[in-house]
Amino acid sequence: MSTTNTLSIGDRVFGGYVVSEKLGEGGMGAVYAITNPALNRKLALKLLLPQWSRSPQVVQRFLAEARAASAIRHPNIIEILDASELANGSHYMLMEHLEGQSLEQYLRQHGPVTMETALVVLFQVCAALQAAHDRGIIHRDLKPANLFVSPTAEQPLFTKILDFGIAKLVDPSLAGDLRTQTNAIIGTPSYMSPEQARGAKDIDHRTDIYALSVIAYELLSGALPYAASSLGDLVYKQATSPPRDLAELRADLPEAWRATIMAALHPDPDARPGSAQAFLEQLQAATPNAQAHPGTVWLPPPAPAKRRRWALVLAIVAVCALVGGALGFGMMGQRRGFEPQVVAARKPRPRPRPRPRPKPEREVLLYQMAPMPPVAAEAPEPPTPRRRVRPRPAARPTQTRRPKPSTAATSRPSKKPKFDPNKVYGGSDKDSPASP
C-alpha cells in the first residue's frame, strides 16, 4: 500500500486484498474496489482524502456514518464491515460491494416508471427508512443518487440506501462526541424539506418523509416538484407557491396516490404522513391488487381462456350416456336374476423383443476419391511392316593409284598455236594448224 492516503491499482491492502478499480471520488474521500483472489470475494473500501484525515470533526463524522449504518442492520441498507485507521494515519471504511447502478442512473435510462414499479422501490426504501428512524437515525440526504439498485435472482429492483455521512444521530451512543452545528444547512437542495433548507435546528424524521415524496414524484413523472437554480430560489418557491400538481404530469395515476404524495410535500411537517410506514400504507391502500411483499412487480391478471360450448355439450352427452348405460345394465340384471361372473383376466404375454440385427461394419473412409471419367477405347495399332534387309555388296578391292608421270618424262604443249591468216603455211602437217 502506498504511504499516502490515496491508493493505486494493484496495491495490496489487509493482507490478501488487491485494489482492482476506482469506483468514484467525492469531495471528502474516494471509494475503491478491492478483491481477494484466494477467496474470490470483492469488497468496497472508502478512504478519506489526505486533507480531511487531519480534521478531528471530519473523522468523527466519518466514524459516525459507519456506526449509524452498522447499527440499523437492515437488508436494504448498505452493510459496513469495518471502520478504523491505517498505519499511515488515513481512515477507512470497509463495505460490501454492490453490482448495479444508482436509482438516478436507472431513471436516466428508463424514464418515468409505472405505479406498480414505483411501489416496489418505495416499499424497500420505506422499510429501511422506518428501521433507521426507529434507531434514532435521520438520513437528511435521501435522493436517487444515494439509492442503489442491485438486481438479484428474486428481485430485479433490489434497492439499498447508501451514504449516512450527514445523518443526524439522536441516540447519544451513536453520536459520541459529534454535535450538529446550529443553523447549518447540509443536504441536496432539490430534495431538502423547507425546514431543512432554512437550517432549522429541531428537524426530525419528517424531513426524510419530504425527501421520500420527492423521490416518488420523480419516479412517476420524471421531473422535480420545484425547478430551482439555487438554494435561495428553492426556499423562496417553497414558501410562496405549491409544487406542480402531479395529476398534470400523470393523468393515469389514481387520485389516492396523487393525494398521498402531494400531502407529503406539504411545507408544514404536521400535515405530512407521520412515518415512512404510514406513507407506504397509504400508497398500498390506493394500489389495486397490491401485495405486501415487494419481491414481485405486479402485472395485470391474465384474461380467462374462452371455452368452446360444443365441447362442453359433447362432454355432458357422453357422461349421460355412460350413466344411462350403467343404470340400464343394473336394472336388467335385477330383473333376470343375473349374477355377474368374476373371470380372472389373463395377463397378456409380453411380446418377445426382436433380436437386434448386427449392423454391418462400415469401413470408415478417411477420404473419398472422385469418380474418374470413362476412357474411350483406343484403336489397335497397325502392325509394323517388316523391312527387307538387303545384303551388303562385297567390298571392292582397293586399287592402287598409278604414279603420276613426271613432268620430265612427258611434255605436252601448254597451248595450241593460234591460226594466223596472214601467215603462209606449207604442205607439211607440222606447219599446218590443227583443224578446229
Image: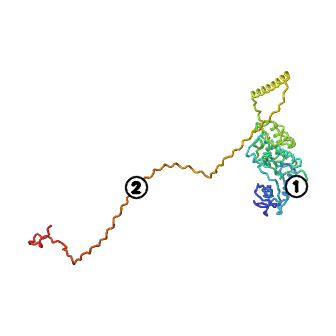
The quadrant holding residue 122 is top right
Q: Earlier in the sequence, mark 1 or mark 2?
A: 1
- The crowd level at tag 2 (other Cα within 10 Å; few <14, some 14-19, many 20+) is few
Tag 1 residue: 178
With respect to residue 336, does 302 lie above or below? below
Q: Which is nearer the eye, 283 or 394?
A: 394
Looking at the rendered structure, the secondary structure element under dot 1 is: loop
Inter-mark Cα distance, 1 to 2: 131 Å
The quarter of the rendered structure image containing the C terminus is bottom left
| Residue 413 drawn at (x, y percent) | 18, 74
User: Are the two marked residues, 1 and 2, in contact with CB atoms closer than 8 angstroms?
Assistant: no
Left or right, 292 with respect to 397, comes to: right
| Residue 31 drawn at (x, y percent) | 78, 56
Dot 1 amino acid type: Leu
Tag 2 residue: 385
Q: Which mark is residue 427?
A: none
Visible in this render: residue 386? yes
